[in-house]
Image (cartoon, rainbow, N blue to C red):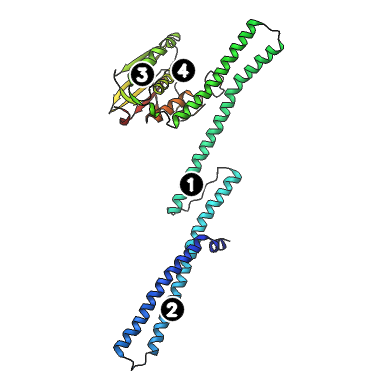
Amino acid sequence: MLLVKTLRSSTFRLALIAIAAFGLIVAAIMAYVYFGTIAYVQSRVGDAGDHSGFTAMIELATAAVAVLMLVLAGLAAVLVTRRTVGRIEEINATSRAIMMSGLDQRIPLRGSHDEWDRVAENLNQMLDRIETLMGEVKQVSDNVAHDLRTPLTRMRGRLEKAYHAPRNGEADAALIGDTIADLDAVLGMFASITRISEIETRARRRAFRTLNLAGIAGEVVELYDAAAEQVATRLSLDGDREVAITGDRDLLFDAIANLVDNAIKHGCKGGQVSVTCRSADGGATIAIADDGPGIPTEERDHVFKRFYRLEQSRYTPGNGLGLSLVAAVAGLHGAEIALHDNAPGLTVRLSFPKTSAQ
């Protein structure tokens, strides 16, 4: 079956064309050698001798060489084309298996480390990435459905209750207010998704300018100072007073605000949250530290995904988009984001490269 596919393949036809062209060149060279040899012998011996035996020997040798080269070229074409078609068939077979059963199939490697193995490795890595993305899409879809079901169910319940109950001005006003609040939460979720997508497409780089990162952090600390006092948390700003950076002020403000808000919400009541800004090696760093329970090590690679929450029941307030926004802003500014143990608590550190600082 493979031999039939080999003989019918376009690669084999191209190989035959190449062999034919090569054969014409070789034939021309051999004709030149043949007639040149005959002419040389005649010039040396003259026409007096009998050249028929010598001529027959030259012709036989030339014919043998031509047949041998033709056979070897044809055999080489078949072997090379067979190998190529074989590897292509492996890729095709894997593609068909993926279409039939799913993304868990991979192209087999032969261990030759040649260009075909490298192609197979790249395709397998691409399949791994696609499988990961598909899993994330499914997880996000499930989380969105779960997060939307709660407010929509509440709104429907209120409206159905109001529909069957006698009209009451105060009750109707309270119902409308609660429904508007739930709708605002749903709309806010979609607005966050849209904003994250806009940031990830780097459509916001036109707003970049030179900024003082410490000044932005100071504004965030001032904004959340009252929220920290409500839970008896000490919120402080440390580090350098001037930390130059190039970026989008609004996005950086939102990213820092999300991190500070998380630190206050998930830290210990009566604890401490510190925000530290420093210039480092021509770049800049900002770290937000709390003394709460922290994040388990095995969860740290997942918390920046959209709608991912440590609390899997998803009954606590929030939608799991805050850290996704932080990760998108960090990526837009070329910054590295890292989570470290604060013993106890968690430290979130954003490190901006030299190219972002002025």
What secondary structure is found at the residue carrying circle 3? helix
Mark 3 / mark 4, whichever is N-terminal: 3
Mark 4 / mark 1, whichever is N-terminal: 1
Mark 2 / mark 1, whichever is N-terminal: 2
Alpha carbon of mark 4 to alpha carbon of mark 1: how far?
A: 42 Å
> Residue 266 got which mark?
4
Q: Tell me the residue at 43%/25% (across/down).
A: 326
Residue tagged by mark 3? 216
Alpha carbon of mark 4 to alpha carbon of mark 2: how far?
A: 87 Å
Instruction: Please say if 350 is above or below 170.
Output: below
Instruction: Please say if 228 is above or below 77.
Output: above
Amino acid on which the number 3 mark rests in the picture: Ile
* 4 or 1: mark nearer the eye: 1
Amino acid on which the number 1 mark rests in the picture: Leu
Instruction: State left or right for residue 354 relative to residue 190.
Output: left
Residue 111 visible in the snapshot: no
Q: On the image, which quarter does residue 334 sit in?
A: top left
Alpha carbon of mark 3 to alpha carbon of mark 4: how far?
A: 22 Å
> Residue 123 got which mark?
1
Between 109 and 189, the one lying in front of the other is 189
* 3 or 2: mark nearer the eye: 3
Amino acid on which the number 2 mark rests in the picture: Ala
> Residue 64 got which mark?
2
Considering the image in quadrants, where does the C terminus appear?
top left
* 4 or 2: mark nearer the eye: 2
Alpha carbon of mark 3 to alpha carbon of mark 1: how far?
A: 44 Å
How far across and down, in percent of the image, does residue 322 sit?
A: 47, 23
Between 113 and 244, the one lying in front of the other is 244
* 3 or 4: mark nearer the eye: 3
Considering the image in quadrants, where does the N terminus appear?
bottom right
> Residue 303 got which mark?
none
